[in-house]
Image (tube, grey):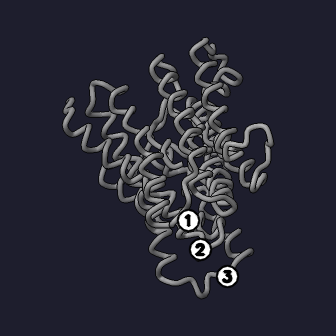
């Protein structure tokens, strides 16, 4: 049953929550390494996703779904959350969040190009325009407006932020072959990757001495970046008859995120970041307006 009021409430809730996660990333990284952050957040996410699956009566589908394609779900789990979030968190560790977040936001443009390469989908003229605008915005942000110098504060951080867009787009391309329920599918990804992230965290870092602020922040990341917000967005898509109008709300997220980073973390928001982000958003709007696949979906914001 369609209910535009419910769709709007769910979508705005998801957008507002996604807008806060970049701030939560930076707070968590004050107390934990990227691999610790991934492991702890994944534990929270598994608990939340299991609760959601139980409430929806889908627990019985978990084992049959995995048994049908165990290798496929293991690969999904290795890509996301394991490698994707480890790369993303390290990028946030090396860069100001006000740079890492807009760079990661270009993933939807990356998805269009990768879909053409791996799925044989045609790239239209409008998509080339969107890609050109988006990556021009990336260069503006990465160079802080010094376009011709091509000097970066952290080349590794910039590279990891851009690599995260390839990993996230690759994850959704892999998901085009997934006919399983989305909650069950993403739960399997987290469950299968969790032992690996916990082992890596145990081997490389100590859990002693982490204050309650770190545990609270990482729980927030696991709850809202990887768990509940995903379901809010799916619910919005379920209730609306106008998917395009609802999904356009996602473009509010990076600007709210920058405002929160400036007020809570105290990061300086460069004019070049705003200009570059505007280029990326305009490119994404052009892409979405043409009805292209790859528009923001359930897990797109945070990232």
How far apart marks 3 and 1 lie (CA) works out to: 19 Å
Q: In the image shown, does 160 or 38 lie closer to the viewer?
A: 160
Which x, y percent locates residue 131?
63, 25
Looking at the rendered structure, the secondary structure element under dot 3 is loop
- Mark positioned earlier in the residue sequence (3 or 2): 2
Which x, y percent locates residue 197?
65, 64
**Residue that badge 2 annotates:** 30
How far apart marks 3 and 2 lie (CA) works out to: 14 Å
Identify which residue is drawn at 65% across, 47% down: 79
Disc nearest the viewer among 3 and 1: 1
Identify which residue is drawn at 42% across, 57% down: 224
Identify which residue is drawn at 47% across, 57% down: 21
Marks 3 & 1, CB-CB < 8 Å contact: no
Marks 2 & 1, CB-CB < 8 Å contact: yes
**Residue that badge 1 annotates:** 26
Looking at the rendered structure, the secondary structure element under dot 2 is loop
The answer to whether residue 84 is left or right of residue 178 is right
Q: Which mark is residue 206?
A: 3
């Amino acid at each position: 049953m369609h209910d535009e009021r419910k769709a709007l409430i769910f979508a705005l809730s998801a957008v507002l929550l996604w807008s806060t996660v970049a701030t939560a990333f930076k707070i968590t990284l004050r107390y934990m390494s990227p691999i610790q952050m991934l492991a702890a957040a994944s534990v929270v996410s598994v608990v939340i996703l299991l609760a959601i699956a139980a409430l929806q009566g889908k627990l019985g589908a978990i084992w049959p779904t995995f048994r049908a394609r165990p290798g496929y779900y293991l690969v999904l789990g290795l890509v996301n959350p394991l490698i994707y979030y480890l790369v993303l968190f390290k990028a946030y560790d090396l860069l100001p969040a006000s740079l890492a977040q807009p760079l990661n936001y270009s993933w939807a443009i990356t998805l269009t190009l990768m879909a053409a390469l791996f799925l044989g989908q045609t790239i239209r003229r409008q998509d080339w325009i969107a890609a050109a605008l988006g990556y021009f915005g990336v260069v503006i942000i990465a160079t802080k407006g010094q376009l011709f110098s091509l000097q970066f504060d952290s080349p590794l951080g910039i590279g990891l932020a851009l690599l995260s867009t390839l990993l996230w787009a690759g994850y959704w391309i892999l998901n085009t072959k997934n006919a399983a329920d989305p909650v069950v599918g993403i739960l399997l990804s987290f469950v299968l990757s969790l032992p690996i992230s916990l082992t890596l965290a145990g081997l490389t870092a100590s859990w002693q001495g982490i204050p309650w602020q770190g545990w609270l922040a990482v729980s927030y990341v696991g709850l809202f970046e990887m768990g509940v917000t995903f379901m809010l967005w799916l619910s919005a898509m379920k209730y609306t008859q106008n998917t395009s109008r609802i999904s356009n709300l996602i473009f509010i997220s990076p600007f709210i995120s920058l405002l929160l980073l400036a007020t809570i973390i105290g990061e300086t928001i460069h004019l070049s970041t705003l200009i570059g982000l505007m280029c990326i958003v305009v490119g994404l709007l052009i892409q979405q307006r043409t009805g292209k696949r790859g528009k923001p979906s359930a897990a797109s914001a945070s990232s």
